[in-house]
Image: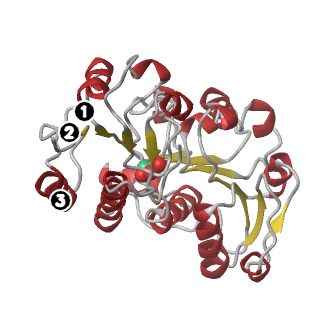
Amino acid sequence: MSPRIIVTRRWPGAVEKVLSEQFGAVLNSSDRPMTQTEILAAFEDYDIVLPTVSDQLPAAIFPERPRARMIGNFGVGFSHIDVEAAGRHGIVVTNTPGVLTDCTADLAMALMLMIARRTGEGERQVRAGQWAGWCPTHMIGSRVSGKTLGIVGMGRIGRATARRARYGFGMNIVFHNRSRLDDEELHALEARQLDTVDDVLANADFVSLHCPGGADNRHLIDAGRIATMRPESFLINTARGDVVDEEALIDALECGRIAGAGLDVFANEPVVSERLKMRENVVLLPHLGSATEETRRAMGMKVVENLAAFLDGRQPPDRVA
Ligand code: DGY
């Protein structure tokens, strides 16, 4: 009997075609997010569940005796999945690393430029018909070139952001990473590894977060740490909303403790705090890091590779649990 496979959301058309024609997967053509009850039922009724990063899969989502044997996550981050609970139920979990590195790093740079050069504010002003013409003191921002970028989490995306910042904008790179890193690329980038996150925050004009979300990094950037940032600095988050204590960040933005923030991810997505929306010194994007035609297709095809390996009895290349 062929395995029963379910996809929780709409995926790129080319990927859905493969999933449905070659694997007989059940697609979600309405793209309505599945409820927790529906997802739990999917674990009872299907052999393979293909969720996305917006589906919450806590321990309670797994029934006592799930039929499901694999979760093929569409996304590199998997902090929305209780992987230990999945493991206890004998469910293999895979993700999609590598293919979204460049696009996410591009977006981190875009946020840096947008917030420092006030492009969101500028665009709003033009559209509102409130631009009164060029003058030497109009909407003055901060220079990006030559400044210091502090990276928290020097994995694939952290490094790709560092390359863009160093080679494209002549920025100085400092970073924190849990393990010690020492290799040719970092030497070429003249990137300095600092001992603590606090050291990075105190030394950077821009802080860009590239560490995973989840319990280990929850509120890594809290009120105490934000207080160590320079008043003229900016915080960029393309990682996960829970890495930052959002209320503490908003307090800091409101009282001018830091200059601004560029955020692609939020604590309670898709709900964005009204206090954030009211501020001019923030750029707010709807979790667009990997949102390009090429990358989203590649992410889907990675899931297909993992699925094919699993069904063939091989080790899926991107197994995380
Ligand atoms: C991921 O893959 O984890 C991103 O947040 C969405 O592309």
Residue 18's disc is 3
Q: Are the residues at dot 2 and dot 1 in contact (C-beta closer than 8 Å)? A: yes
Please tell me whether mark 2 sits on a helix, a strand or a loop: loop
In the picture of the structure, the residue carrying the numbered disc 2 is: 4
The quarter in which the N terminus is drawn is top left
Does 166 sit above or below residue 315?
A: below
| Of pointers 1 and 3, the one earlier in the residue sequence | 3
On the image, the x and y values in percent for residue 13 come to 16, 57
Instruction: Give the CA distance from mark 3 to mark 2.
Output: 15 Å
Q: Residues within 10 Å of mark 2 (few under 14, many from 20)?
A: some
Point 52% across, 34% down: residue: 87
Residue 46's disc is 1
* Residue 5 image-quadrant placement: top left
On the image, the x and y values in percent for residue 126 come to 35, 56
CB at mark 2 closer than 8 A to ligand 1?
no
Amino acid type assigned to the residue bearing label 1 in the image: Tyr
Instruction: Give the CA distance from mark 2 to mark 1.
Output: 5 Å
Point 32% across, 22% down: residue: 40
| Of pointers 3 and 2, the one earlier in the residue sequence | 2
| Of pointers 2 and 1, the one earlier in the residue sequence | 2
Q: Nearer the viewer, residue 40 or 10?
A: 40
Amino acid type assigned to the residue bearing label 3 in the image: Val
Number of labels in the image equals 3
Point 40% across, 21% down: residue: 61
Please tell me whether mark 3 sits on a helix, a strand or a loop: helix
